[in-house]
Image (cartoon, rainbow, N blue to C red):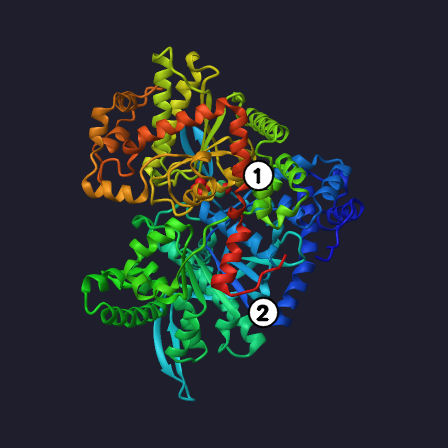
Amino acid sequence: MEPLHTYTKTELTDLIVGKLRRNFGRDVDEATGAHMFKACALVLRDIMSAHELETEDRVKDTHARQVHYLSLEFLMGRSLMKNAYNLGVVEPLTEAIEGLGFNAADLFETEPDAGLGNGGLGRLAACYLDSMTTLDIPARGYSICYELGIFKQKIVDGQQVELADNWLGLGDAWLIPKVDETETVHFGGKVKEQWDENGRHRVVYEGGTDVLAIPKDMEIAGYGTDHVNVLRLWDAKSPVPVDMSLYSRGEYLKAVEQQAMAEVIAKVLYPDDNHYEGKSLRLKQQYFFVSATAQSIVRKHRVQYGTLRNFHQKHVIQINDTHPTLVIPELMRILLDEEGYGWDEAWHIVTHTVAYTNHTVMIEALERWPQELVSTLLPRIWEIILEISGRWQNRLTEAFHGDMSKVEHNAIVWGGDVRMANMCVCTCFAVNGVSALHSDILKKDLFRDLYQLTPEKFQNVTNGIDHRRWLSECNPKLDALIRDCTGGDDYLLRPDALKKLEQFQDDAGVLSRLQQIKAENKRSFAAYVARESGILLNTDAIFDVQVKRLHEYKRQLLNVLHIIYLYQHIKNDPHFQFTPRVFLFGAKAAPGYAVAKQIIHLINSLAATVNADPACKDRLQVVFLENYRVSLAEKLMPASELSEQISTAGKEASGTGNMKFMMNGALTIGTLDGANVEMHEVLGDENIFLFGLKAHEVQELRHRGYKPYEYYMHSGDLKAVLDQLTRGFDDGVSYTDITNRLLFGAGGSADEYLLLADFESYRAAHQRAGQVYLDQRQWNRVSLLNIARSGIFAADRSIRDYAGNIWKVPTKEL
Ligand SMILES: *Cc1c(COP(=O)(O)O)cnc(C)c1O
């Protein structure tokens, strides 16, 4: 690898001072932390901009195939440290900042998280941008420039309160508006077909509204390369200026209204994770972003190649879940209506361009848009969808020999709905799940018939994480140990090199250093929590952590039931053997998800009772961490010892939190779900605490008829725990609703996620974990093996899989 140009402390100091003067009209001694942050961001942006232009030229000259990664979410977190790290300037930048009289650590902390995502799906997209760039793939991400990202969570009287996340004040330092690349997106109106004077078929719209899509580009630096890619975030603006002349005609408000209607499109990220809401504004967001994106890709392609005939050879569009599905009919529209292609040729191009990643098999998360909404909002797109759907139905009828139940099940437009997942499988040249188990379930269950029809489309790409951010950057002490053991920083570009750590599994010196690092990280995290909330964590106890979105299928409630069990035994059984634990939770609940909010309240009620009880002193502590987000996860992962990955088997598509914990040396207590299955494969039974029903056993139990009440009747422990839920805790709040859901169901089936069925097995797994922890030598050995074998969960590996098996683009050779 040719050495990259780097910057010295002096050079960076001069650049920062220059930015302060020119952009903010200030000398260093008048600059606030915010000015300083922005100046640093602008300096790094300039460096990346220069690289981006070179990258663009290179892509153009080589006629390389480009990857377009479409996602309604990119949970980027902070960028200053990330960009400095990838550009190789962390040290000189830190020194420059300190030299100018600022505390570098504090400065990095002033950056707001770019929270343009809900959880795992959005964070995955962010990790993939890093890896695609690091591997020199010509790639772009596309999304919406939400003014408000995922809400900020406050806990008030034990309950979640949502606050607006106005990230753009400082966060826009990274965004470069490209006004000259504005696209226009059309909504509503009526479709009219005409033939122009040359006899050409023309589709025109009567009425409706236009919305301008203005790109705000965020540059993405790769690690150890000059390659720079771009995340293009579309902002929405009305093309109609507020026309003061309308005011006198009483239409001023109308003009303002239209402007507000356009701009509301990019106002806010929908805070639902793994849940479909059929909201009209959400559909507008989806079309707005895919239409602008498709037009932008086509426009650039036309400039370079003068034809769209080779479009599918030069581009692949990867869609992250079904949220960007409308890019399919939108590309068809452009090819048919604007380029004048016939249906078959357009279809050939589109079906060789778009690939689909499925992220869930849960029915409530699958998008099915009411045709009424689609046809009103997007009349031309609706016509195209109907045509796709009709042709598809003919094909299904033929393939399934008229088996109408199969035709119905796999149809695109049916019963007044447009079923996005079916449209994707019909159209896309590749369909992938995100872990081995999940991809298997897609073939056997969700898309069973379509797998029979087109088995060659179905693939697996197990998710991965950016191990540079999630290990090296956030856990510098562990990074240092790895360098010492593996002979350098090779692992940063070859995550498999982590394997070399295995040689040290019996090395007392290395194991004790690993233990010391974890202890120091626990103390730093405890100091952070003390500063933020005043709570003092017991750093001698196991840090047992469950952080992820709050969802019933993720079973935070199972964790709670177990803590209540422990609490009762600590209180009632003087001989109870138990390794002291601090249970840490972090989770946002979708604002409209009442049960999830109740569970947050419950965790806080339980925490208040446990933490105030002298019987629990030094033995049991429960803490709910407010506002779980990327920057909090970066502090927490290095300090975690036990990772709770306890979803009902078959429900979690992959999980990526599980990988972050593993890489930071936490041991996992988990079910055989999502990527936990692959973690177990590399670790073996002895290095992971598995429990619970397997995916097929879950199905069998449901088939036999699951009766949670019987578990309640036959287990004294479970009965005591559930009765306590009904009674409530010291704050006097009763959780009868939750008990009732578990025992009798409410609307749905009782204990839908099989908590009671898995409780005893979970309890036993916890006991095993507690036992191993007493033997620190053994615990550290297992921790080391977890780190050593986590290399396959690097996003670099996932991206090489996508590049080789789906995108067919070359990646950097090492
Ligand atoms: C990694 C991550 C997630 C995903 O966690 P899972 O346990 O896989 O659901 C969610 N939120 C944030 C902030 C993350 O960093």
Classify residue 448 by image quadrant. Answer: bottom left
Q: Position of residue 37 (x, y in %)?
A: 67, 43
Residue that appears at 37% across and 50% down = 438
Label 2 sits on a secondary structure element that is: loop
> Image quadrant for the N terminus?
bottom right
Kindly identify which numbered label has been placed on residue 64.
2
Q: Position of residue 388 (x, y in %)?
A: 32, 70
Q: Position of residue 436 (x, y in %)?
A: 40, 51
Question: Vertical placement of 734 versus 197: above or below?
Answer: above
Q: Position of residue 460 (x, y in %)?
A: 42, 55
What amino acid does circle 1 point to?
Glu
Q: Residue furthest bottom?
A: 198
The 10 Å Cα crowd at callout 2, few under 14, some 14 to 19, many 20 or more, is: some
Residue that appears at 27% across and 71% down = 395
Classify residue 207 by image quadrant. Answer: bottom left
Q: Nearer the viewer, residue 505 or 562?
A: 505
Residue 652 lies left or right of residue 309; in this view the side is: left
The 10 Å Cα crowd at callout 1, few under 14, some 14 to 19, many 20 or more, is: some
Q: Residue furthest top?
A: 574
Question: Vertical placement of 3 versus 352: above or below?
Answer: above
Label 1 sits on a secondary structure element that is: helix
- Disc with the residue nearer the chain's start (2 vs 1): 2
The residue singled out by tag 1 in the image is 502
